């Protein structure tokens, strides 16, 4: 019997005698792409120093990072982030600001002053804070009291001054006379507190107030995701979202409530998946005023937003109470239960690189779903704390330094345990005499007969090795192999004969 292909990944749910010949009951640090039993390369240190949670900002060729869990989203050449506790941030051109601007709280006071023939009617005013760099505008102040005039100018106060560094100006709007909507009167320096209005209707700017509900992003917002030019996030059990193309505005009425706290959000082909710990929903619609929720699955949710990644167009993977799950916006399927049974994951980061999904856990292990060929599962242990992807490289973060994974000069140490090999009959007692191994490098191989180790060999050179099973231990119903080390096994063959003399 020969074992020549080792590319089936791990299958630990089934009894080991039911595994396919190319699978392993233990399968760690193995390069399944080669087909032979060979390790993946170790990591290679770079000169990139970052904190634990890092994201590469493609538009500005820059690494951003934080010592605490932080959600990052790059959209339209701006990096949006939230640490899930304080006010969400936006970052571009080396400057970080709050996401949105807090509105003025005090209404304008309006008084008649010197005579004029330009104003005639009943007027009210509001003012906003404005960022002329990126066009962010706050919600307006409260509306001023009505003032009626036929022959005077109007003195308007703008009493509040923002301490937000992104605010560059105040904008004053009025309604009344021939203006039926709040219309821009003037844009003032941010420190200006009074303005005398004497503009006739024909000389108004013409732009109407659009930011009447443009409130700042809520403190504690989590899980930033973009879909259809809208930003989505969660606060407790509430899904919050922005108008189309206005990422700085988070109207309070733009929300959908769920029955439990939201634990993850992901964009799919036909909407947004919203996950609680035990349920999966899809939110569909053409814009913020038409969004609605539908239940997809009532027994499968998400345990960590950090595990959610898009792997194919419109398909995401995440970690649930049972293992890894996937959906393209329709059925939720388990990727791991069939091969591994129920597994407990503790994700702190994830990545997709070269058609492999990686979920990295608190204990340092990484489970990978490799869909380059026939999808397989495997375990990896790089000795890292978090994952990141940038410039067609997969990185691991350890002790404040990024390491380029798979690029080291040495191999990681593999751990492999073969299927339980029974020659088609688990009830027939057989004789296992010799094992032949074609190997390269340092390998430790143990032979198990009836689940007991009967011999262990250390192989250190490139050769075909003949391994003799001790005569008194040759009989049994099954044989199995455990392999560890940094070398390679190209082929493993063993001889078997029926039991003699009854």
Image (cartoon, grey):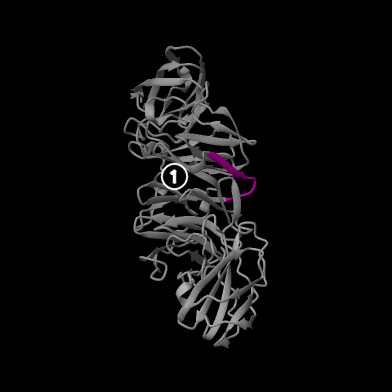
Quadrant assignment for the C terminus: top left
Quadrant assignment for the N terminus: top left
Q: Is residue 320 above or below residue 33?
A: below
- Direction from residue 297 to residue 58 in the image, left or right: right
Report the residue marked by disc 1: 340
Q: Nearer the viewer, residue 179 or 262?
A: 179
Q: Dot 1: few (<14), some (14–19), or many (≥20) neighbours within 10 Å?
A: some
Q: Which residues are magenta?
A: 62-70
Q: Nearer the viewer, residue 488 or 230?
A: 230
Displayed quadrant of residue 432: top left
Q: How many numbered discs? A: 1
Residue 217 screen position, x and y as percent: 56, 63
- Direction from residue 116 to residue 392 in the image, left or right: left
Q: Residue at x 49, y 16 (%)?
A: 441
Residue 406 lies in the magenta-colored region: no
Q: Nearer the viewer, residue 308 or 459?
A: 308
Can I make out residue 234 in this image? yes
Under tag 1, what secondary structure? Answer: helix
Q: Nearer the viewer, residue 291 or 14?
A: 291
Q: Is residue 139 above or below residue 492?
A: below
Q: Residue at x 39, y 66 (%)?
A: 287
Residue 90 screen position, x and y as percent: 56, 53
Residue 150 screen position, x and y as percent: 54, 88
Can I make out residue 252 in this image? no
- Direction from residue 312 to residue 26 in the image, left or right: right
Residue 38 screen position, x and y as percent: 44, 24
Q: Is residue 308 above or below residue 212?
A: above
């Amino acid at each position: 019997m020969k074992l020549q292909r080792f590319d089936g990944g791990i299958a630990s749910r089934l009894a080991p005698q039911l595994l396919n010949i190319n699978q392993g009951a233990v399968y760690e640090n193995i390069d399944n792409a080669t087909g032979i039993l060979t390790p993946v390369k170790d990591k290679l240190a770079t000169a990139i120093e970052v904190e634990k949670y890092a994201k590469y900002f493609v538009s500005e060729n820059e690494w951003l990072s934080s010592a605490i869990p932080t959600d990052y989203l790059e959209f339209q050449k701006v990096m949006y982030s939230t640490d899930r506790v304080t006010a969400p941030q936006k970052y571009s051109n080396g400057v970080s600001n709050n996401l949105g601007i807090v509105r003025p709280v005090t209404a304008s006071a309006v008084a008649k002053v010197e005579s004029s023939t330009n104003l005639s009617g009943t007027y009210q005013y509001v003012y906003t804070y404005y960022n002329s760099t990126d066009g962010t505008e706050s919600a307006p102040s409260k509306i001023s009291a009505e003032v009626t005039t036929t022959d005077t100018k109007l003195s308007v106060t703008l009493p509040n001054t923002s301490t937000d560094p992104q605010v560059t100006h105040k904008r004053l709007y009025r309604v009344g006379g021939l203006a039926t909507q709040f219309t821009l009167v003037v844009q003032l320096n941010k420190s200006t507190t009074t303005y005398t209005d004497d503009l006739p209707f024909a000389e108004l700017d013409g732009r109407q107030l659009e930011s009447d509900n443009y409130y700042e992003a809520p403190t504690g917002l989590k899980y930033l995701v973009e879909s259809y030019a809208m930003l989505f996030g969660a606060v407790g059990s509430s899904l919050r979202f922005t108008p189309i193309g206005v990422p700085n505005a988070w109207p309070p009425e733009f929300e959908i409530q769920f029955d439990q706290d939201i634990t993850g959000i992901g964009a799919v082909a036909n909407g947004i998946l919203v996950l609680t710990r035990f349920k999966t929903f899809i939110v569909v619609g053409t814009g913020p005023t038409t969004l609605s929720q539908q239940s997809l699955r009532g027994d499968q949710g998400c345990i960590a937003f950090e595990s959610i990644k898009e792997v194919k167009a419109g398909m995401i993977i995440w970690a649930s109470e049972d293992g890894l799950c996937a959906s393209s916006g329709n059925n939720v399927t388990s990727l791991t239960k069939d091969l591994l049974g129920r597994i407990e994951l503790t994700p702190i980061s994830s990545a997709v690189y070269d058609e492999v999904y990686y979920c990295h856990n608190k204990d340092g292990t990484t489970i990978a779903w490799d869909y380059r060929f026939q999808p397989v599962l495997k375990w990896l242990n790089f000795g890292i704390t978090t994952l990141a992807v940038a410039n067609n490289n997969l990185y691991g973060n350890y002790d404040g330094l990024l390491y380029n994974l798979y690029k080291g000069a040495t191999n990681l140490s593999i751990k492999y345990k073969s299927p339980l090999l029974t020659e088609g009959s688990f009830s027939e007692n057989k004789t296992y005499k010799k094992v032949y191994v074609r190997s390269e490098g340092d390998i430790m191989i143990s032979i198990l007969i009836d689940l007991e180790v009967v011999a262990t060999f250390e192989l250190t050179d490139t050769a075909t090795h003949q391994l003799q099973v001790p005569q008194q231990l040759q009989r049994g119903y099954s044989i199995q192999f455990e392999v560890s080390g940094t070398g390679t096994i190209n082929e493993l063959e063993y001889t078997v004969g029926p039991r003699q003399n009854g």
